[in-house]
Image (spheres, rainbow, N blue to C red):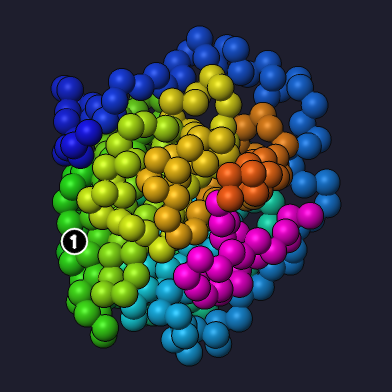
Amino acid sequence: MSIQKARLQGKRYLNPVPTTVGDFSTMLKVLPQFLFKDRSARSPSKPLGPFHTDPLLYQVPPPSGLRITWFGHSSSLIEIDGLRILIDPMWDERAAPTTWIGPQRFFAPTLPLSDLPPIDIILISHDHYDHLGAVTIRQLARLPRCAGTRWITPLGVGKILTTLGVAPTNWTEVNWTDCVEVAGPAGTISITALPARHFSGRSLFNRFETLWASFAIKGPRHRLYYGADSGEWPGFAQIAADHGPFDLTMLEIGAFHELWSDIHMGPDGAIRSFQAMGAHGLLMPIHWALFDLALHAWNQPIESICASAKKENIRLWSPTPGVPTDVMPDVEVCTGWWR
């Protein structure tokens, strides 16, 4: 299937294929399970970590040219061909509109935001609170080393960034298929916004009014796909054909349930989507290990995908949180830190 720009229906953006998003009836089905089902396995039984990122490591460029620091959930620092890209930074204590209630972090940030190296690009995939934390964005907007940082975000999200202190001159909004090129020391890096099967909204009353996206990141030497939040859909093969092959493909595995399988693929869906993309390179599981956002055990997604990947002969790339790790061609990284 061809990859198209996002379309509006009135004020609401449409998914690339027909998609069901949980409505009030779904909430009525799920709420009793959230409230009354045994919750003990949904969070770690003992504190995780502490995990620590040594900021001095960023003074030395990655030998491979591609290095990733995964901070948990979907937040990562990508060092690719001489540029640093911070993806969906989430340092907030809770993935919620308030600081006193809502899903709380399983472990503390691995380093203060002020200890990050200079960031060239900050990439925001959509406006949900587990990807766009108000406290995090406000702090980044005030950091002197981020004064010249370029923010790239889907249509409509720029206004939210402005309310959180990001200067309008610093952000660029993109529709699906739009490409932003950034000059780097090793050559130009392109970032192309692509469809995801998900939704947006920072309340129940403004769903779909801003766009959501995945991204292909292509440098002179390396290519990476960030799938962000998405259910399965038939476009993954075309994305790989148009923008791959990818050295690393980042796909979500957590916060899944059959009731909302249209918008979260889960570990089995990640395996199938990766295979649809040709199963080239490494598969990095994201969107897990930081917040209680579903009914499954907190470590069930990673255990499930590890078993499936072994069966399907797929190479996983799952580093310890906060540890800057080089991506080497076809070299699996699976530290098992969660055990």
**Which residue corresponds to the image point at 83% horizontal and 46% vertical from the top-left?**
45
Work out which quarter of the rendered image holds the N terminus and state it. top left
Work out which quarter of the rendered image holds the C terminus and state it. bottom right
**Which residue corresponds to the image point at 31% horizontal and 61% vertical from the top-left?**
217
Q: Main secondary structure of the magenta part?
A: loop
- Asked whether residue 68 is drawn in magenta, I would say no
Q: Is residue 108 something that shows in the picture?
A: no
Image: 243 above or below 324: above
Type of amino acid under label 1: Val
Where does residue 107 sit, x and y in percent of width and height? 68, 57
Image-based side of 138 in relation to 68, left or right: left
**Which residue corresponds to the image point at 34% horizontal and 64% vertical from the top-left?**
223
Image-based side of 72 in relation to 77, left or right: right
Residue 165, image quadrant = bottom left
Q: Nearer the viewer, residue 286 or 27?
A: 286
Q: Nearer the viewer, residue 173 or 15?
A: 15
- Specify the segment rendered in magenta: 314-339
**Which residue corresponds to the image point at 76% horizontal and 22% vertical from the top-left?**
37
Image-based side of 339 in relation to 156, left or right: right
Where does residue 167 sit, x and y in percent of width and height? 24, 63
Image: 253 above or below 296: below
Residue 212, image quadrant = top left
Where does residue 76 sit, x and y in percent of width and height? 48, 62
Provide the residue designation for mark 1: 180
Q: Is residue 176 something that shows in the picture?
A: yes
Q: Nearer the viewer, residue 110 or 84?
A: 84
